[in-house]
């Protein structure tokens, strides 16, 4: 099983950011999601002229992985100019699909931070709330 170091994930996320479609914000973001088998999936932000339809890099990377049949993940890296952390919507989806994984945040000037999903979404809504006995 391959294990990707954070620096490798950074390079993948940085490359993914170059494919960003961000004509409105001019804020490219790239993400690299490491599956347990070592496969790295990429995502970039894709903006729509109908702003609410914009999808973030993180969720696009997750979608790419899930559509390829992957369900277990080891880490996520996010690259932006100034260290964007995942937005609230992405935090929810990261929690739902990836669970409590490390999330590396990288900037173009070489800064980095690390969080865990649980740190970014400390009291998540998730499938435990959707058990049958919880529904009327
Ligand atoms: Zn987001």
Image (tube, grey):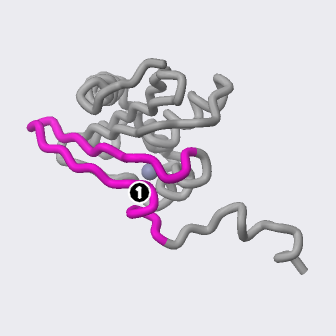
Q: Is residue 115 above or below residue 119?
A: above
Say which residue appears at 54% left-offset and 54% top-offset: 95
Q: Is residue 98 above or below residue 13?
A: below
Q: Which residues are magenta?
A: 98-122
- Assign a secondary structure to mark 1: loop
Membership of 121 in magenta stretch = yes
Q: Residue furthest left?
A: 109
The percent position of residue 131, horizontal first and vertical second, equals 82, 67
Say which residue appears at 72% left-offset and 70% top-offset: 129
Say which residue appears at 45% left-offset and 61% top-offset: 118
Membership of 78 in magenta stretch = no
Say which residue appears at 45% left-offset and 23% top-offset: 40
The percent position of residue 55, horizontal first and vertical second, equals 50, 43
The percent position of residue 5, horizontal first and vertical second, equals 30, 28
Describe residue 87's horizontal placement relative to residue 52 as left or right: left
Q: Nearer the viewer, residue 58 or 46?
A: 58
Q: Which residue is mark 1?
A: 87
Q: Residue furthest front?
A: 1
Describe residue 134's horizontal placement relative to residue 1 as left or right: right
Q: Nearer the viewer, residue 100 or 96?
A: 100
Q: Is residue 12 above or below residue 133?
A: above
- The answer to whether the residue bearing label 1 lies less than 8 angstroms from the nearest atom of ligand 1 is yes
The percent position of residue 52, horizontal first and vertical second, equals 52, 53
């Amino acid at each position: 099983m391959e294990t990707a170091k954070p620096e490798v994930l950074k390079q993948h996320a940085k490359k993914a950011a170059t494919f960003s479609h961000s004509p409105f914000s001019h804020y490219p973001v790239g993400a690299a999601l490491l599956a347990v088998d070592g496969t790295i999936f990429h995502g970039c932000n894709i903006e729509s002229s109908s702003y609410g339809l914009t999808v973030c890099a993180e969720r696009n990377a997750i979608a790419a992985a899930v559509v390829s049949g992957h369900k277990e993940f080891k880490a996520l890296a996010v690259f932006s100019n100034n260290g964007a952390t995942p937005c609230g919507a992405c935090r929810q989806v990261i929690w739902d699909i990836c669970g409590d994984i490390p999330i590396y945040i990288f900037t173009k000037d070489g800064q980095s931070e690390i969080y865990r999903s649980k740190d970014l979404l400390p009291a998540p809504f998730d499938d435990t709330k959707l058990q049958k006995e919880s529904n009327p």
